[in-house]
Amino acid sequence: MTSLFSDPYFLAVVLGHFTVDMINSLRSLIITYLSEPLGLTNAMIGVVSTIYVIFGSLSQPIFGYFSDRIGTRWVVSGGVAWMTVFLSLAVLIPGESSLVFLIIGSLGSGAVHPSGIAQATMIGRLKLKGQETTASSMFSLFGSLGYFIGPILAGILLQTWGLRGLAVLAVAAFPVAGLAFRLKNYFSTTNGPKAEAVAIEKQGAGMIIALIALAAFQSWAQQNMSVFLPKYLSDAGWQPASYGVMISLFSGGSAVGTLFGGRAADKFGKWRVIFFGLGLGAIPFLLIPLANYSWWLYVLVPLSGFLTSSCFNAIIVIAQHLFTVGVGLASGLTLGFIFASGALGTLLSGKLADLYGFNPVFYLSAALALAGSLLGLLFRKR
């Protein structure tokens, strides 16, 4: 593990991931903050959030392809710079234009995610004796840390200086783009794992469909929390600093879960992490409505993040081996689908919340996690 952080290329991509996901974490807080002056319903919040995620997600295969062809350096550094510029515009020009700039900025996230995780996987494969899921989980850990720290800082800045206070985070994040650009000799991600080139033929389309469904269920359940938890608490009278802390606890639990799950997947098998992580993850979703805004939320919310995130990198690495194209393109295809499917799911969840309240959304998330757990049994050879 120490050798990873002594590698400047690994450090550059994980810091890039931390930066873009710190900015991504501001999405739900900014939309919640603007929901009253702009008159946004829960369904409209879901629509805006979905457009944001879809815009960034659909671009990920394209950026993954470019990363394979022109190199990680350009894609990661450009993606970080793009996000910081458009975050600045989003918070300094308030109103409906904020939402437009926020959505355009998501292209930076679409650039950094596939190129960064492909590079992290290659470093783990070549420098950690095949511990690619561990290295991939470390990359994801820094993204989760960004989601953890971002809402805490943003809640304080929003409550103190309003929307424009978030420009502080954009200014602080910009130097990471320079760090990523200074390094030139990243590992090539052009070639996929040829040793498993027959995987699709042997396992058939059914395994592909199962993986797609598994990724969709995991993502939908998790995005339900990240998108609607702030509004759920805001409707109950919680202030931005308070619900910012709660969404940070969810992200903090996710951060620990990605790290634990990555190491466990390399040691015990990816399917076990998927089966137990999502299966147990259904429990806190069921209990959150029963907590009734009590201190139990401080236990259940991070626990839900820990369990549902533990299998994320196992899904990514399985896909990288199943799709035998460049690692960047394979990562882009998988991540793009994961984020897009979760975002589309939140459209339905937002409508469900408008019609029946938020409790059914938590129950739906539990059902999705349980379904994903059962699909994990199909990957027992992993």
Image (cartoon, rainbow, N blue to C red):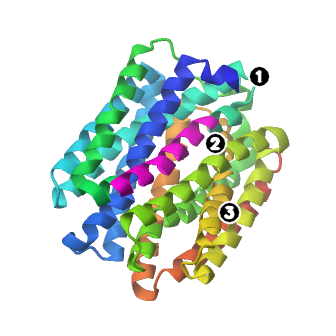
Q: Name the residue type under label 3.
A: Gly
Q: Quadrant of residue 221?
A: bottom right
**Residue 148 magenta-highlighted:** yes
Q: Identify the residue position indicated by label 2 in the image.
A: 319
Residue beneath the point at 59% across and 41% down: 141
Q: Marks 1 and 3: CB-CB under 8 Å?
A: no
Q: Nearer the viewer, residue 375 or 155?
A: 155
- The label nearer to you, 1 versus 2, is 1
**Residue 348 magenta-highlighted:** no
Q: Identify the residue position indicated by label 1 in the image.
A: 129
Q: Nearer the viewer, residue 324 or 22?
A: 22
- The label nearer to you, 3 versus 2, is 3
The residue sitting at the front extreme is 160
Identify the element where label 1 is drawn.
loop
Identify the element where label 2 is drawn.
helix
Q: CA distance from mark 3 to mark 2?
A: 15 Å
Looking at the rendered structure, the number of numbered marks drawn on it comes to 3
Q: Name the residue type under label 2.
A: Ala
Q: Nearer the viewer, residue 289 or 299?
A: 299
Location of the C terminus by quadrant is top right
Q: Identify the residue position indicated by label 3 in the image.
A: 372
Graded by Cα atoms within 10 Å as few (under 14), some (14 to 19) or many (20 or more), the crowding at tag 3 reads: many
